[in-house]
Amino acid sequence: MLGEIKLSEGLREYLSKMPDLDLDLLLEAYRRPLPTSFRVNTLKMDEYEILEMLKEKGVSFKKIPWARYGYVVENNSIDLGKTLEHMLGLIYIQAPISMVPVEVLDPKPGERILDLCAAPGSKSTQIAQLLNGLGVLVANDISFERVKALASNLQRFGVLNVIITLMDGRKFPRFAHECFDKVLVDAPCSSLGIVSKNWGIARSWSPEIAKRLSKVQRQLIVAGFDCLKPGGELVYATCTLTVEENEMVIQHLLEKRENAVLKEIDLPSLKYRCGIVEWNGTKFDEELRKTIRVMPYDNWAEGFYVARILKEGDS
Amino acid sequence: MKLLSPRERKFLENRLKGLYGVEEGFNDLVLIKCGRGRIRATTKETLELASRLRGIQQIGLYVMKISNGDISLSVEGSQLLNDEIKENVIELDEERVEKWMKAIPIKTETTYHGRYVIGKFNRLYLGSARVSRNGLLYPQIPKWRRIPIAKNSE
Ligand SMILES: C[S@@+](CC[C@H](N)C(=O)[O-])C[C@H]1O[C@@H](n2cnc3c(N)ncnc32)[C@H](O)[C@@H]1O
């Protein structure tokens, strides 16, 4: 028998104040394991051929409608992480909602893209796949240990046009000011969207954790924005639910950089709701409605927050 | 990290031709030395951007290691060269590809020239194995990407 999931006092109180949140459904989503899903690596082989190899192994799967090359496994008959396909980099195991931020970023061959918080590389490999060998990906992270995993994953995926850097992302504009067409800030966060992977997250969560992370996130988003060329786009994403780590970070950027403009996100078939514009008596910019919140029970997968921001100006 | 000089590149291309029958090699790519005979490949654009950045840990793909004129290709190195590879190839069946990816030595009756042979499964190249005198091939699959060996087998 599994034990019952425990929320810290602080988390229970916090969630009870959140608009548009169904706590019972959230707890049910937390109890369910995340679906297994993967992307096929078209840098190495034809999509159809890879899928055939998996079918021969008895894996059955369904297309993920919001992610190119994404599939969700329907029968967990084998451990995908131990297959030849995984070891050779023909597939990349990645949770389904985690594929959303890069779809919103929509990398195009030839672009220069910065992934500011990149390790262990799920989204970097996804960006590289969509660049299809043209343009350059810079994959950065602050953690030496995690950069090792990032390097392994990019190697296995077969990415040629990549530079891996080990750096505090907040320092990037010092030498890469207005250097990139697109930037992804997949920020470190309190992970309330992926509690089903680790129930301990809900037990140990406190408002102080969210506040501390919010400070770093604000610095990272401004740094990422400053690395964008005028006319470029930034996607900010977290796998958490708090307003401090999501809408308030975007609000901060809008206040700090007047050429930051929110853009609509359009992902048919993904269930989500729009960003929060009032919290604890404070009203935010109405434009924040253009950002999206995906609750874990919306698609019975992870919870995520995603914002798409344009840097106005001539490219 | 340093680029291969034109002389070093020529030497490498000659060796690739001699050992594996590769004619075109890593044509448009830039080759970078990264210590102990290891070579990485990337694009010109990538290298250009790198000159502006700091904190660089790695650029591009690890493709091969060269020592005393012998070349051991990484999985990705052999996949990049793909069907340019004409010689010193061992075709693997399903059973042997499992062994290869677990880095379990494989018996062979064939004699190969050079110290390394390249594995191939269907249309996929799988990097190099070291050829030993006792007729065994030792696949050079790095530990972090080996298929784990089940505890109760072999
Ligand atoms: C949510 S994870 C990124 C996941 C990754 N994008 C992926 O898809 O695989 C956040 C990452 O931010 C990194 N990080 C934390 N603080 C940072 C900073 N100041 N600069 C750069 N990276 C940072 C962490 O080491 C962690 O790897």
Image: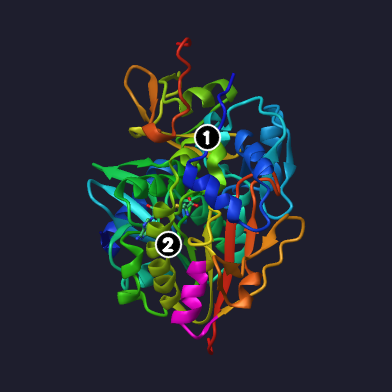
Depth check: give the residue in front, B42 or A67.
A67
- Residue at horizontal 53%, vertical 33%? A81
Q: Position of residue B118 (x, y in %)?
A: 45, 35
Helix or strand or loop: what does disc 1 sit on?
loop
Q: Which residues are magenta?
A: A248-260
The residue pinned by badge 2 equals A214
Q: Are marks 1 and 2 on the same chain?
A: yes
Distance Cα–Cα, label 1 vs label 2: 24 Å
Q: Position of residue A94 (x, y in %)?
A: 57, 44
Helix or strand or loop: what does disc 2 sit on?
helix
Depth check: give the residue in front, B148 or A212.
A212
A250 magenta-colored: yes
User: Quick check: A262 left or right of A167?
Assistant: right
Q: Chain of mark 1?
A: A
- Residue at horizontal 40%, vertical 33%? B141
Residue lying farthest to the bottom in this orientation: A314
Q: Position of residue A289 (x, y in %)?
A: 65, 71
User: Quick check: A40 left or right of B151?
Assistant: right
Bin the neighbour count of mark 1 within 10 Å (Cα to Cα): few under 14, some 14-19, many 20 and up: some
Disc 1 marks which amino acid?
Lys
Circles 1 and 2: CB distance less than 8 Å? Answer: no
The residue pinned by badge 1 equals A6
Mark 1 / mark 2, whichever is N-terminal: 1
Q: Position of residue B8 (x, y in %)?
A: 27, 57
